[in-house]
Image (spheres, rainbow, N blue to C red):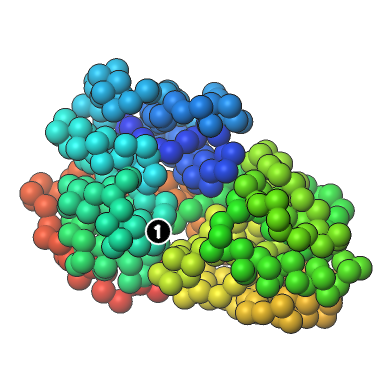
């Protein structure tokens, strides 16, 4: 029988989902870890923005604590860091390079990185932006967990010197995301914080369809959208939607829209958590196109892929109810089979245990890529 792991995780924020997509990813993963018996201490920098918008101040699946800076964190939680099976630093953690150097100096059993923004991180590094991670630090990690799979893993090992890169996609909390039985209120909805590189796709795949179908109802939920966006009259706006209301939101849509950031489209194999959440709620999905999506949710069977406005309007007007339900059921079956928080936590635990059991001083960069040759199409 495998032993339970003790983990210390430094992340952007677990307590607040306000303008923070990391929160739902951590919540699903760590709840899954708790269900498997693992013990987790999540450490979050105490910053005013998240402190003013905490919607999960006291999670029941891990211990949550706040710190004021790197010195405070390492001084107050030094014993937990030393005793942990693994210390994991997430992307976008404030003072990330300083924190990583301090943790490396403390020599924990395993030091890992969880990049929830891999394509964005690599694009930043190529520009010389090391605000959250320094390029020289990548070889320090025993495992570089990546939100993106496919060829990105090989790039991390051969191009950036990662000792081991492993895909750790987002996941869904199957207990929190399920159909609520509410009647449909909107024909198409979207959930996501404003991002300049996503906005053109949102214009093309939701706002323009709303203009062409004035009798249909649309909704966009998310914060930080500029005031100068010309929302059609039939597009409802929700400024912030806490995770506890997500299932209701999805359940009231005939279709939901998935829009992907430009860097993640370019990288491929970077599924959004919104895909898994909507599928868990049995809401049919319309998505933009990117490499790897068809292996996750086959086009036309479990997802509709839209390249332009006409594709969206056709989906909203031409599909009958049996076709819509068949899409939703196919996506639900695939996500429940392999993309729950419990499944993702088990993948993480397997990778960590392999490192803990490996007495070798460390495989050379690229070894994991060679071992995984031919596996990039596997989810």
- Residue at 40 percent across and 59 percent down: it is 120
- Residue lying furthest left: 361
- In the rendered view, tell whether residue 342 sits above or below residue 94: below
Q: Quadrant of the N terminus?
A: top left
- Residue 55 placement, left or right of 120: right
- Residue at 46 percent across and 28 percent down: it is 47
Tell me the residue that label 1 is attached to.
120
Q: Residue 252: tell me if it is visible.
A: no
**Element type at mark 1:** helix
x then y, percent, for residue 326: 73, 71
- Residue at 84 percent across and 49 percent down: it is 182
x then y, percent, for residue 363: 12, 57
> Residue 226 versus residue 239: which sits nearer the camera?
226
- Residue lying furthest right: 215
In the picture, residue 274 is in which quadrant?
Answer: bottom right
Q: Residue 25: tell me if it is visible.
A: yes
- Residue 314 placement, left or right of 67: right
Q: Quadrant of the C terminus?
A: bottom left
- Residue at 11 percent across and 60 percent down: it is 364
x then y, percent, for residue 70: 29, 28
> Residue 194 versus residue 299: which sits nearer the camera?
194
x then y, percent, for residue 353: 26, 45
| 10 Å crowding of disc 1: few (<14), some (14-19), many (20+) | some
- Residue lying furthest front: 228
- In the rendered view, tell whether residue 356 sits above or below residue 319: above
- Residue 192 placement, left or right of 180: left
């Amino acid at each position: 029988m495998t032993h339970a792991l003790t983990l210390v995780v430094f992340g952007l924020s677990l307590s607040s989902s306000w303008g923070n997509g990391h929160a739902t990813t951590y919540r699903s993963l760590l709840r899954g870890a708790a269900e498997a018996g693992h013990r987790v201490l999540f450490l979050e920098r105490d910053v005013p923005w998240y402190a003013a918008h905490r919607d999960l101040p006291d999670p029941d699946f891990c211990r949550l604590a706040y710190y004021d800076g790197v010195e405070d964190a390492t001084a107050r939680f030094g014993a937990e860091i030393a005793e942990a099976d693994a210390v994991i630093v997430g992307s976008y953690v404030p003072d990330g390079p300083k924190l990583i150097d301090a943790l490396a100096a403390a020599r924990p059993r395993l030091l890992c990185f969880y990049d929830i923004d891999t394509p964005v991180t690599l694009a930043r590094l190529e520009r010389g932006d090391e605000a959250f991670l320094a390029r020289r630090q990548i070889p320090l990690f025993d495992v570089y967990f990546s939100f993106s799979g496919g060829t990105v893993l090989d790039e991390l090992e051969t191009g950036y010197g990662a000792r081991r890169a492993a895909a750790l996609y987002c996941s869904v909390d199957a207990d929190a995301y399920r159909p609520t039985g509410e009647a449909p209120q909107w024909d198409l909805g979207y959930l996501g914080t404003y991002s300049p590189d996503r906005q053109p796709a949102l214009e093309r795949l939701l706002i323009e369809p709303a203009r062409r179908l004035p009798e249909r109802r649309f909704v966009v939920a998310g914060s930080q959208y500029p005031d100068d966006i010309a929302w059609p009259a039939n597009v409802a706006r929700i400024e912030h939607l806490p995770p506890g209301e997500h299932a209701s939101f999805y359940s009231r849509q005939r279709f939901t829209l998935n829009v992907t950031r430009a860097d993640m489209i370019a990288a491929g194999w970077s599924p959004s958590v919104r895909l898994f959440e909507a599928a868990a709620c049995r809401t049919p999905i319309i998505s933009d196109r990117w490499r790897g999506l068809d292996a996750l949710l086959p086009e036309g069977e479990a997802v509709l892929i839209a390249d332009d406005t006409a594709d969206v309007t056709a989906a909203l007007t031409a599909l009958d109810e049996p076709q819509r339900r068949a899409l939703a059921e196919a996506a639900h079956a695939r996500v429940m089979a392999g993309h729950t928080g419990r499944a993702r936590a088990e993948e993480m635990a397997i990778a960590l245990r392999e490192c803990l059991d490996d007495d070798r001083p460390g495989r050379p960069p690229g070894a994991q890529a060679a071992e995984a040759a031919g596996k990039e199409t596997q989810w």
